[in-house]
Image: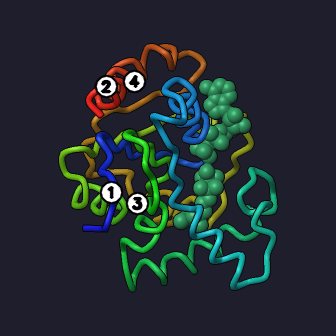
Amino acid sequence: MEDRVSEPKLVLVFSGKRKSGKDYVTDLIQNRLGSDVCCVLRLSGPLKHQYAQEHGLDLDQLLGPGLYKEQYRADMIRWGETRRRQDPGFFCRLATRGAQQPVWVVSDARRLSDLQWFWSEFPRQTRSVRVQSSETTRQQRGWSFTAGVDDAESECGLDSGIEFDWIISNEADALSLEEQLQPILKLAEEAADNH
Ligand SMILES: Nc1ncnc2c1ncn2[C@@H]1O[C@H](COP(=O)(O)OP(=O)(O)O)[C@@H](O)[C@H]1O
Ligand SMILES: C[C@@](O)(CCOP(=O)(O)OP(=O)(O)O)CC(=O)O
């Protein structure tokens, strides 16, 4: 267990394919709860930070949504996997260090080891959420299949074998996100009230 000033009351661990809308949905949750109550934690944050430093790259561009990140994605995946093999909780620990809000929203779990780390560190508080969109919708948002990325563990590691606590369908013709997120927001508000 880490040395922490305070433990989170609720940890919502999100996963989903590229352009399924993980950032969109997790930002929406944070906007609804407010940044005093809820922080969005990205496991890719410390990964990109360290990768940029070691390779002399522009961190801001790696953190952004543009093509720059995509040029380095396959190599970042390989680099991150080497790190995770030595220590599966490495990026989880770095990403959660210093988080003080009662509700943590982790926007980008990709592998079973990511989820296992949260289940093991915060067994009572952790809930898993999957964001799903069709390939057509993801294509409309700019996705196209890239070998070495979309067929790798980084994108497929949580495709099967997990019973997610919630599955959110992020599609124009699905129930509105407001409605789908209602039980999650209710749980988060209760967790924050008991803080
Ligand atoms: N429900 C939605 N309504 C409008 N735009 C959306 C919606 N979901 C996702 N998007 C847009 O699609 C793009 C990809 O979403 P993003 O959250 O970045 O995906 P991911 O983090 O899963 O790769 C972004 O430009 C985002 O604003
Ligand atoms: C090397 C990565 O961490 C890059 C992740 O970058 P983002 O989290 O920005 O990706 P998307 O939101 O899916 O576009 C992937 C990994 O395997 O760890």
**Picture quadrant where residue 3 is located:** bottom left
Q: Kindly check if marks 4 and 1 are in contact, taking CB atoms under 8 A apart as contact.
A: no
Q: Specify whether 183 is left or right of 31.
A: left
**Which residue is under mark 3?**
157
> Which-is-in-front pick, marks 3 and 4?
4
**Which residue is under mark 2?**
193
**Picture quadrant where residue 4 is located:** bottom left
Quarter holding the C terminus is top left
Outermost residue, front direction? 5
Residue 114 seen in render: yes
Earlier-in-chain disc, 3 versus 4: 3
Question: What residue is at 59 percent from the left and 62 percent from the top?
Answer: 45
Q: Amino acid at mark 1?
A: Leu
Residue 149 seen in render: no
Question: What residue is at 52 percent from the left and 23 percent from the top?
Answer: 32
C-alpha separation, residue under disc 3 versus residue under disc 2? 34 Å
Q: Position of residue 1 (x, y in %)?
A: 24, 67
Q: Classify 1 as above or below 128.
A: below
Q: Position of residue 36 (x, y in %)?
A: 50, 35
Q: Amino acid at mark 4?
A: Leu
